[in-house]
Image: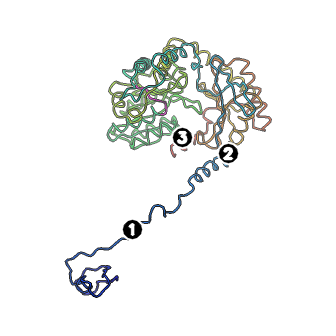
Amino acid sequence: MVLERQCHGNTQLPRCWAKLTETDGADSRCETAAALLARRSAPLRVVKPAPEPIWKAPAPKNYTGYFDAAVARLKAERRYRSFVDLERMAGSFPSAIWHSPQGPREVTVWCSNDYLGMGQHPAVVEAMTRAAARHGTGAGGTRNISGTSHPIVELEAELADLHGEEAALVFTSGYVSNQTGISTLAKLIPNCLILSDALNHNSMIEGVRQSGCDKVVFSHNDLAHLEELLQAAGERPKLIVFESVYSMDGDVAPIRQICDLAERYGAMTYIDEVHAVGMYGPRGAGLAERLGVMHRIDVIEGTLGKAFGVMGGYIAGAASVIDAVRSYAPGFIFSTALPPSVAAAATASVRHLKTSPAERQGQQCQVAQVKDALIRADLPMLATPTHIVPVMVGDAEACKAASDRLLEKHGIYIQPINYPTVPRGTERLRITPGPLHTGAHIEALTQALVETWKALDLPFSGLALEPQERMQPAGKMRHSQ
C-alpha cells in the first residue's frame, strides 16, 4: 500500500511530502511508516511521474499555415512579388525571350543591372568558357580548403589595381561582401561606433547590425547631421559607412565632404560603389575615382554582378585591413569560393573596362536621351545625376498594373519597385538605360509609358521632380527593420 505524510509544525522532521510503499501481507519485513519517520538522517525521495511516451504527444501544428498567412498578407497589401520567366540571349541584349503563359515572346528589358551589357561581351564570354574547359565548373570548396584558384588570385590583383589599393578580397556576392565585411571590420575595432547613412542598402544595414557595435544613423547625405554625430562621439573609434550612388533614387553622396569630416574627426571610411564601378571614372573604378578622392577612402566595396556583367562582390583596401577580414570574416571563411570560370570572366570584364571608355560613353548618351524623352512626354520622372531613371507611381497596385501592361501589351519589361525596397507611397518603375538601347527602343518605351499612364489614369507630371523634392522616409524605414 502507499502511505503519505506531511511534516510541519514544531516537529524536527524535514518539511516535505513523501510517499512510502509497504508490501502487502502479514509476513512483510519492511519497515513500518513510523520507523521510517523516525529516521531523520535518511533522505526522502520525491518520485516524479514518467514523461508521456512520444507517440502520445500532441500532434504538431499546421506550420505551413503560418507561411500561407504571411504570403496572403503580402497579396492583400498588393506587394506580392511575381517573377517574370526571362531568357537573356547573348548577342541580342537588351532583347530577351519572355516565357509567358501563352508561349515564348521577345521583349525589351529596361531594368537590368547589367548596366553596360558586359554579360554578353565576347571577351568575357570567351574567358568564362575557356576557364571552364580548363578548370572545370566548380571551385572545389572554400578558399581555406581548396577553393583558392589561380583565376581568383588574378582577379583580386586586378581589383586592387583598379582602386589603387594594396589588396582586394573577393566574395560570392556584393550582399555578402557588405554584410560580412562591415560586421567583421567593426568587430575588430574596440569600442567602435558606426555612423550609417539613412538610405544605405539592406546588406550594409545587416552588416552594421551583425557587428554588435553601437550605431547612429545620419540623415541621408546630411553633412551637418553627420558632423554633429561625429562631434558627440568624441575620441572613440568611428566607422562611416555610405554609398556613392543610391540605387533607388539615383542620387549621389557628397564623398569629398564626407572624407573631410572623417579626417577632421578621426573616422575610418567605408564606401559602397556597387552602382558606380565600371561606369564612372577614367578606368571605371567608380564615383570616388571620378572625383579624385579614391585614395582618401579606407575601404572600397564593389560588385562584379552589375556593370561588370558577371557575379560576386569584393572589398579593396590596405593589405592589413584585407588580411584581417580574410582571417576573421565568417561569410568568407565558410563560403564556397567563386568558380574559376566566373573569376576569369570577371577579370576579363574589369580589364576591358579599365581601358575602354566606349561602353561608359554609350550609356551616358542613352541615359540623357531617355531622360529628355520622358520629360517631353510629361512623365513623372525623378531627376537624378546618374544612370538610374525612376518613374514615380506612388501606389503598389498601380505600379504592378503598369508593369504588367507594359509587358503584356508592349513587350517592355520593367519590374515594379514596391515596399520594403522603397517606402509606401513612393512606388516606382526603375529604368536603367544602357549603351545597347537604341533610339528606336527609346521611342517605343516613351510611347508605351504614355499609353499605359493614360490607360490606368495615372498622373502625369509636366516637370521632372527636383532632387530636394525626393521623399526621404526610406532611410528611417530601412534602418528600423
In this image, 52 relative to 446: left or right? left
Numbered label attached to residue 78? 2
**Which of the two discs, 1 and 2, labels the residue nearer the N terminus?**
1
Residue type at the position of mark 2: Arg
Dot 3 alpha-carbon crowd within 10 angstroms: few under 14, some 14 to 19, many 20 or more: many
Question: Is residue 476 highlighted in magenta?
Answer: no
Question: Is residue 171 highlighted in magenta?
Answer: yes
> Disc count in the image?
3
Q: CA distance from mark 1 to mark 2?
A: 52 Å
Residue range of the region highlighted in magenta in the rendering:
169-175
Q: As drawn, which residue projects farthest toward the left?
A: 41
Q: Is label 1 in a helix, a strand or a loop?
A: loop
Residue type at the position of mark 3: Gly
Residue 52 locus on image (x, y percent) = 44, 66
Residue named by callout 3? 475
Residue named by callout 1? 50
Residue type at the position of mark 1: Ala
Residue 182 locus on image (x, y percent) = 42, 35
Q: Is residue 328 above or below residue 280?
A: below
Residue 3 locus on image (x, y percent) = 33, 83
Work out which quarter of the rendered image holds the N terminus and state it: bottom left
**Which of the two discs, 3 and 1, labels the residue nearer the N terminus?**
1
Residue 267 locus on image (x, y percent) = 38, 33
Q: Nearer the viewer, mark 1 or mark 2?
A: 1
Q: Is label 3 in a helix, a strand or a loop?
A: helix
Q: Quadrant of residue 12?
A: bottom left
